[in-house]
Image: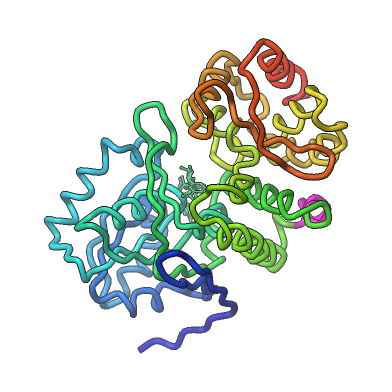
Amino acid sequence: MVDILVSREIFISSYKKEYSVSFIKDCIPSVLSSSSEGHFIIDQNFYNLYENSLKQQSNFLEPLIIEATEDNKSLDKMSSYIEELLKRGVKRDHKIIAIGGGIIQDISCFISSTILRGIDWDFVPTTLLAQADSCIGSKSSINVGEYKNILGTFNPPNQIVIDVSFLETLDHKDICSGVGEIIKVHAIKGQDALSEILQDYDELFTNKELMEKYILNSLLYKKELIEIDEFDKGPRNIMNYGHSFGHAIESATNFKIPHGIAVSIGMDLANYVSRELGVSDGSIFLKMHETLQKNYGDFSHYEIPINLLIDALSKDKKNSSHSLKLILPNNEKLFIDSYKNNNQLYEICSDFLVNLMNA
Ligand SMILES: NC(=O)c1ccc[n+]([C@@H]2O[C@H](COP(=O)([O-])OP(=O)(O)OC[C@H]3O[C@@H](n4cnc5c(N)ncnc54)[C@H](O)[C@@H]3O)[C@@H](O)[C@H]2O)c1
């Protein structure tokens, strides 16, 4: 039996059950100690870095190792993972233990909700984006062809274990990607929360305690929305701020831009579109632009072809048959509205990409 030092714990109510999010230092022994019937699905880069600590645990079993690419979370790839788990003897009373970022989460959540009509799963998020945002909310999102995150289920894990020390090995771009989602949820929470993160932005990258505080706050703010609208029928839609444009940017650049960085560009673009359409007076664009631009800075010269962006925007799953659904800020709050995919929108997006993104 291992002594487990839980520094913080929160509980999320869901349609299936209440599940816990625990912040645990040196979490590998504690996760493995409860995993006698577990099948591991592990991110390849994470496994390469932490293989020794994993193998030191007596009940560690040979994992299914998957490289974190968008192609690997496509429907086409699911059958090979499922066949592999079946060969390893997965049973309905077993569970999946997923260790990795958002990609491993999406794959593991999707498989555990469908294999043998559903088995339990635990999740150890190892990227900032997964720790601060995606780990709660129950969603799995799988790509089909060129349609990003178009297929999915709602299936919360039994428990989530966060060890912030895993962030020490993460690339700078993946830290910025997570920070993009942290900024998003603070913008949704309200002007005071947004002002606070914008002010603390630079320090976040060097101050581990501050980062841990923002991870926790992000989860608490997201918890408020997912507990009233787990199935994304109303209030939770707002969590897609920056995402219609973000997903379109990811798709238009063949997924070369990390998700949370595309979302950072997407929020900046949504704020700009809102100002140019006269939906807002532009104060929110001015308030966020400098920080967002810093956050996507390494990718600001990346070419985003406007035709591909507009085409991808029209394939967003929130659209209705005749219009695009965009989440834009007005002067007080974020809201979702319908817009025609017309020349004006094309011109505004084009102007942003050419004149503002890398100015
Ligand atoms: N289901 C949801 O609710 C939800 C929400 C947001 C995003 N997503 C999805 O999540 C994906 C993005 O997730 P992500 O940003 O976590 O990226 P990711 O899973 O692609 O991981 C990013 C990179 O970090 C590496 N990595 C992981 N942990 C590491 C560690 N501790 N040290 C060093 N390297 C490590 C991975 O190998 C990869 O190269 C996208 O596909 C997005 O659509 C899902």
In the displayed structure, 10 sits above or below 63; it is below
Please tell me how many numbered marks the rendered image carries. Answer: 0
Residue 50, quarter of the rendered image: bottom left
Is residue 207 left or right of 170 when viewed as pictured? right
Q: Residue furthest top?
A: 343
Is residue 341 left or right of 354 when viewed as pictured? left
Residue ID at (66%, 14%): 346
Residue 236, x across and y down, in percent: 59, 50
Residue ID at (69%, 15%): 350
Q: Nearer the viewer, residue 15 or 204?
A: 15
Residue 290, x across and y down, in percent: 81, 37
Is residue 79 left or right of 251 when viewed as pictured? left
Residue 132, x across and y down, in percent: 59, 58
Residue 241, quarter of the rendered image: top right
Q: How is the image coloured?
A: rainbow
Query: Is 200 part of what is drawn in magenta?
Result: yes
Taken as a whole, is the magenta stretch helix, strand or loop?
A: helix
In the displayed structure, 308 sits above or below 28; it is above
Is residue 100 left or right of 331 when viewed as pictured? left
Residue 121, x across and y down, in percent: 34, 65
Residue ID at (72%, 63%): 207
The span picked out in magenta is: 194-203
In the displayed structure, 76 sits above or below 83; it is above
Q: Nearer the viewer, residue 194 or 151?
A: 151
Q: Nearer the viewer, residue 208 or 304?
A: 304
Q: Quadrant of the C terminus?
A: top right
Q: Quadrant of the N terminus?
A: bottom left
Residue ID at (64%, 28%): 338
Query: Is 106 part of what is drawn in magenta?
Result: no
